[in-house]
Amino acid sequence: MRDTLNTPVTWLALSVLAYEIGLRLNRKLRTPICNPLLVAAILMGAVLVLTGTPLADYNAGGGFLTLFLTPATVALAVPIYRQLEVLKKNLLPILAGALVGSIVSIGSVILLCRLFGLDDTLTHSLIPKSVTTPIGVQLSGMLGGLTPVTAIAIIITGLFGAVLLPAFLKLLRITDPVTVGIAIGTASHAVGTSRAIELGETEGAMSGLAIGVAGLMTAMLVSLGAAVL
C-alpha cells in the first residue's frame, strides 16, 4: 500500500480526483464555501496526514500541477480580449483600483506583522500574498523571505477571496461588474478569478486583468521599497 502511494502518478491522479470531487460538490450545493480548490486541499491534506506521507513525496507527482499555473494565467487573456471595449472605457479606474489595492495589501501585511511581533523574514514572506504564485515566490526570494510560506499564504489568500469576497462586496452593495472583477483579482489573484468567472464574463475578464496589473504594481512597489530601505 505504501509503495503504491509513493509514486508520482498516484499523487497526481489523487489530486485530480480530489478536485473533481470539489467540482461536483460545488455544482450540487451551489455555495462558495465548497470551492473546488478548497475541497481538494482539505481532502489531499487529510490523505497526507492519514498515510503519514511527507510533502516532498506528494510533490513528486502532485507538484506537477504547478506547471499549469503560468499557461492557465495566460489563458485569461481570452476573456479580457472579449471585453476590450469595457477595458478601454475603464482603463484609468482599473489602474487606480489595482494600484490602491496593491498598496493596501502590502501596507496591511507590514502593519499586522509589526502589531503581532513577527520577524522580518516572515513579514517579507507574507508581503506578496495577494499576487499570483510565480510573481509572489520571486518577490519573496528577492526580499529574503521563505518561499514555501509565501506559496501557502498565496493559496490561503486566494481561497479566502474566492469564498468570502463576492458576499462581502454584495454586502457593501458593490455590484458594478468592473469594480467587482478588479477587487477580486487584485485581492485574490487566480483562485479568486475562478470565482469571478462564475459571476459573469465581465467580472472574470477584469479579475484576470487585475492579476497581471496588480502583480506588476506589487513588484514595482516592493522593488522600490527594497531599494529605498
Image: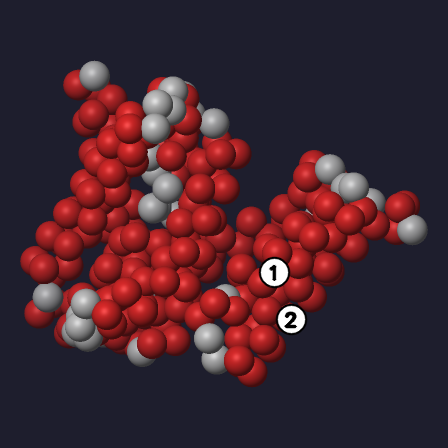
Q: Look at 58% across and 63% down and name the residue there.
A: 39
Name the spot of residue 96 as percent of width and height, x first: 11, 52
Quadrant of the drawing holding the C terminus: top left
Left or right for 75, reference 181 = right
Label 1: state its secondary structure. Answer: helix
Front residue (pair 94, 47):
47
Q: Look at 58% across and 75% down and name the residue there.
A: 25
| Label 1 crowd bin: few (<14), some (14–19), many (20+), radius 10 Å | many
Q: Look at 83% across and 50% down and name the residue there.
A: 5
Count of numbered circles in the view? 2
| Label 2 crowd bin: few (<14), some (14–19), many (20+), radius 10 Å | some
Q: Residue furthest front?
A: 116
Q: Look at 47% across and 27% down and name the residue there.
A: 146
Q: Reading the chain from its start, which is encountered first: label 2 or label 1?
A: 2
Name the spot of residue 9 as percent of width and height, x first: 77, 54
Q: Are marks 2 and 1 in contact (CB under 8 Å)?
A: yes
Label 2: state its secondary structure. Answer: helix
Q: Residue furthest top?
A: 229
Figure quadrant of residue 92: bottom left
Front residue (pair 164, 194):
164
Q: Amino acid at mark 2?
A: Ile
**Would you name the residue on which mark 2 appears?**
21
Q: CA distance from mark 2 to mark 1?
A: 7 Å
Left or right for 176, reference 64 = left
Name the spot of residue 147 as percent of width and height, x first: 48, 31
Q: How is the image coloured?
A: secondary structure
Q: Amino acid at mark 1?
A: Ala
| Residue 40 marker | 1
| Residue 122 marker | none
